[in-house]
Amino acid sequence: MTQHILVINAGSSSIKYQLIDVATGVRQTSGLAERIGEGLGRVKHESDGREFEWQTEIADHTEAFAQMARGFADAGTPLDTLDLAAVGHRVVQGGSEFLTATLIDDHVAERILALSDLAPLHNPANYSAIVAARAAFADVPHVAVFDTSFHQTLPEAAYSYAIAPEVAAQYGVRRYGFHGISHQVVSQRAAELLGRPLTELKQIVLHLGNGASACAVDGGRSVDTSMGLTPLEGLVMGTRSGDIDPGALLHLMRAGLSVEALDRLLNKQSGLLGLGGSNDMRDIRAGVAAGDPAARLAFDIYVRRLKHYIGAYLALLGGVDTIVFTAGVGENHAPMREAVCSGLEWLGIEIDPVRNESPDRGARVVSSDASRVAILVVPTDEEAEIARQAAEVTAR
Ligand code: ADP
């Protein structure tokens, strides 16, 4: 019988799930239960091109799994008829202790909860889903795959902030980095696309979705990344500011803004939304086309910040073989890719306008033949990577 991995990506009010064939890595089913604990919820289940959708109250993550089971049953593939090799859970924060994907037992689950201090928006939801899923699938191994693990190879000089080490140690203040699952799978696929060993490549991977981060990957290892203690540092994002003078926070606090107000400002009301009125790059692009100066400024700051990181990583890596664009903006927004690469021709980074504008959606080269650095677009697939790592852990 075909073996599957069930991949769970849980947020505080939603659970996304996918069923992936272990042997082929092909996604057979995907679904979403949303507005958990928020009154009338919604479930969407898609299997073999057929869609099922209904509304119902979803009180908690346990109920969300019951609704997911209903989706599988309605689609004619009840969960108990499937051979589940493992359930793979995406976990945002693994701190300094989870270096790789890890089989979940009671102790591991408790440690994931304990790390909530460092990821208050994410780890509690990941933990609730783990508890509910372990109850629902008691006979199946559960594996936690962390967004931080890939960055555990950062050298000390990259993960340390320039503050007193005792304070840093006491409060766990260091760069953890995020989007690691994506940076890992994308850098691997980039090497495959180039037909070169991963261990020989210097890469700059730009994951540009609603959240966005850059990663310097040397020989398959993350050596620097733009997100830090939290996913707020670094690039301009949909609603997050990215880098800002920490003195600005002190200034705003002294002016009377509360911690909650600052949290809201920097995480929810900044970035493209704060600057240009929408967190969606498609709206910003439409604004630019219509001559809206706020949208133009949002776009320019977004691009400028990316150039900062590319320049920094070129210097840290001592050169680069490939710059890789991924996630919603990176995969779909050709003008942004062009703007980011323009002016870098003297470094051997030269985009090909026709390739860049091509409607092709797969992994592809968008640099010119003359470009010394390969500019790539590689669709991310975090769920496939979670399934791969979960299968690897359970096969040990
Ligand atoms: P998430 O970080 O939520 O997983 P995605 O990687 O799916 O997000 O990226 C979502 C974002 O991608 C959207 O908010 C939007 O800014 C951008 N995006 C999606 N499609 C396009 C497109 N065709 N052109 C420009 N930007 C796009």
Image (spheres, rainbow, N blue to C red):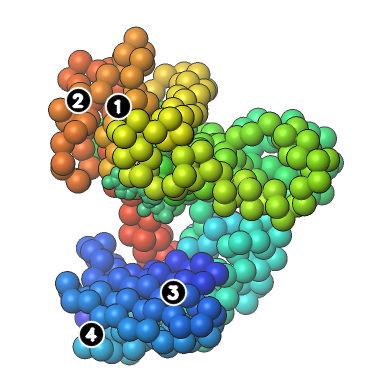
Query: What's the residue at 48%, 63% (across, down)?
Result: 90
Q: Which mark is on residue 338?
A: 1
Give the spatial CA distance, label 4 vs label 2.
44 Å
Quick one: SS at disc 4?
Answer: loop
Mark carried by residue 353: 2
Residue type pointed to by label 2: Pro
Q: CA distance from mark 4 to mark 1?
A: 43 Å
Specify the quadrant of the image occupied by residue 303: top left
The answer to which of marks 4 and 1 sits earlier in the sequence is 4
Q: Contact, CB < 8 Å: mark 4 with mark 1? A: no
The x, y position of residue 74, in whole percent, is: 25, 89
Residue labelled with disc 3: 34
Nearer to us of marks 3 and 4 is: 3
- Going from N to C along the chain, the mark reached first, 2 or 3, is 3
Q: Earlier in the sequence, mark 2 or mark 1?
A: 1
Is 271 on the left or on the right of 69, as rendered? right
Query: How far is disc 2 from disc 3 in space, using C-alphas?
Result: 40 Å
Tell me which numbered mark, 4 or 2, is placed earlier along the sequence.
4
Please name which of the two marks, 4 or 2, marks the residue nearer to the observer. Answer: 2
Query: Would you name the residue on which mark 4 appears?
Result: 75
Residue 221 % position (x, y): 47, 38
SS assignment at label 1: helix
Badge 3 amino acid? Glu
The answer to the question of whether label 1 and label 3 lie on touching residues, with beta carbons closer than 8 A, is no
Callout 2 secondary element: helix
Which is nearer the N-term, disc 3 or disc 4? 3
Q: Is residue 237 visible?
A: no
